[in-house]
Amino acid sequence: MVYHDAYQIYELLDKWNHQGPPNVEDMNRLFESKSNEVQRRFLYGQTLLHRAVESFPTHTDVVLCIFEAFPQALQIEDDNGFLVLHRLLFSGNWYKSHEIMALVPQFVESFTESVILPTPTGRLPLHLACQRTESEELVRYLLQSFPDACCYRDEDGKFPLDHALEVVEPRASIVEILVKQHPVLLSYQDSQGCLPIQRLLKDKSRQPSRRPSRLDTVIKVLLEGFEGSLRLQDREGRTPLLLACTLNCPLSTVYLLLRQWPEQITPNSAATIFDNERFNGELIHSSLASKSVTFQNVQLWLQRYPDIVTSPDGYGRLPIHYAVASPSDEASEIVKYLLDFDNASRKTHQLAAVDNDGMLPIHIAAAATSTNSNHILLLLMDEYPGGLLIANKDGRLPWHYGECSRQDIVFEETTRRFPDVEVDLELVPDEIRFDFLA
């Protein structure tokens, strides 16, 4: 096809055009015969290069043809104040394409100032990339080109890190790159007194489609960079854990925050913060799996909430399910206290309780590898020997988990007490992974 003017090319660069992008050879012929055509401005002050990176950024042959014919287009702002680099980064989530990543260095090398020039809303190329990209390579490149970009705030007062946390599916790897470049960002509080971790939790409540696993991975990165954020409150007096609970974040997120600092839940704070005693119980449940849980705290909790001993959480687990897996030095003392608490009927109920996966406390104890495991296992087997023959929903007995975790005592005691037990080694799991021990 013969192009008579740049307007024909401009129309073909419409992303809704079913004819596809213009032909590169035909464009070259036009630019060679009429060099001024490539310099024309169109709707909203866009050049052909603005239009090309917005509509067909993955067709790098088309983009580079226009770029090579008129590289000065990189320095031209459209009517919205966007440079070509801004438009490329803003146009959508194109960054899974290796071809797009090849364009950015060429544009930056040709017009180096583009990485430090903001849009009218104060956003640098790094802000735009963090807002829309899934490419670690692109974020690294922009940071290397302008390392101080991560410290710049746009007109909304947001750093690139804030935009990286606000996307629907934030990527821990990108957050980690930004945090390592400028760790002090983790301690910056906005006008509401919120740290990055608190802003992330608030956004989760507004974007319920976010996957908990992706969110939890990002939270781990933020806590590794600044664990002290767990103790800081926003203007309304809410710590990250309080926000996670009051904004109805997933339990996996609540447990993650709680494991880092279990002592933040005391009888007084639980009563003050939450009016739902069942949810208080769920917090206490998870804290029992922590290494830093103390016997004294457990005593205080149970004196305040005695019914928690036999109250299941959202996974159908009682406190003892968590306590038997705790790496705490006081774990065996805590387990014995739970079993002896109040009356014999509570003990029987705890020992025979199964969670949503059909797991008894002895299943979980057999899977644990803490220094107190043997003592706890002997206690459970003596108190409830019948539990050794109860299978979970996968058909596994406690000794199957014991074999995987090298707790040989479980198999030895099972065969000693029940010589006729059927031995099926195929059910021994290759690995053991529980959500509350992750």
Image (spheres, grey):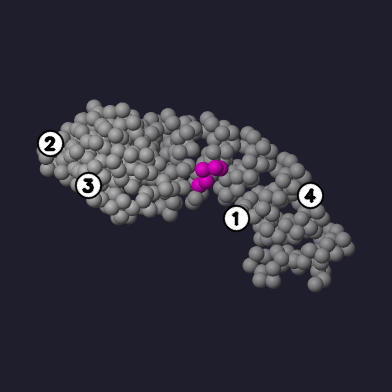
Q: CA distance from mark 1 to mark 4?
A: 24 Å
Residue at numbered disc 2: 342
Q: CA distance from mark 4 to mark 2?
A: 81 Å
Q: From where the camera sits, is residue 350 visible?
A: no
Q: Earlier in the sequence, mark 1 or mark 2?
A: 1
Q: Nearer the viewer, residue 147 or 216?
A: 216
Is the magenta region chiefly helix, strand or loop? Answer: helix
Q: Are marks 1 and 3 in contact (CB under 8 Å)?
A: no
Residue at numbered disc 4: 72
Q: Nearer the viewer, residue 437 or 129?
A: 437
Name the amino acid, label 4. Answer: Gln
x, y (%) of residue 316?
26, 49
Q: Please identify the quadrant where the N terminus is shown.
A: bottom right
Residue at numbered disc 1: 92
Q: CA distance from mark 4 to mark 3?
A: 84 Å
Q: Which residues are magenta?
A: 170-174
Q: Quadrant of residue 385?
A: top left
Q: Earlier in the sequence, mark 1 or mark 3?
A: 1
Q: State left or right for residue 418 relative to residue 120.
A: left
Q: CA distance from mark 2 to mark 3?
A: 31 Å
Residue under the point 67% across and 65% down: 14
Q: Residues within 10 Å of mark 1 (few under 14, many from 20)?
A: some
Name the amino acid, label 2. Answer: Asp
Residue under the point 37% across and 39% down: 406
- Magenta span includes 172: yes
Name the amino acid, label 1. Answer: Gly
Residue at numbered disc 3: 418
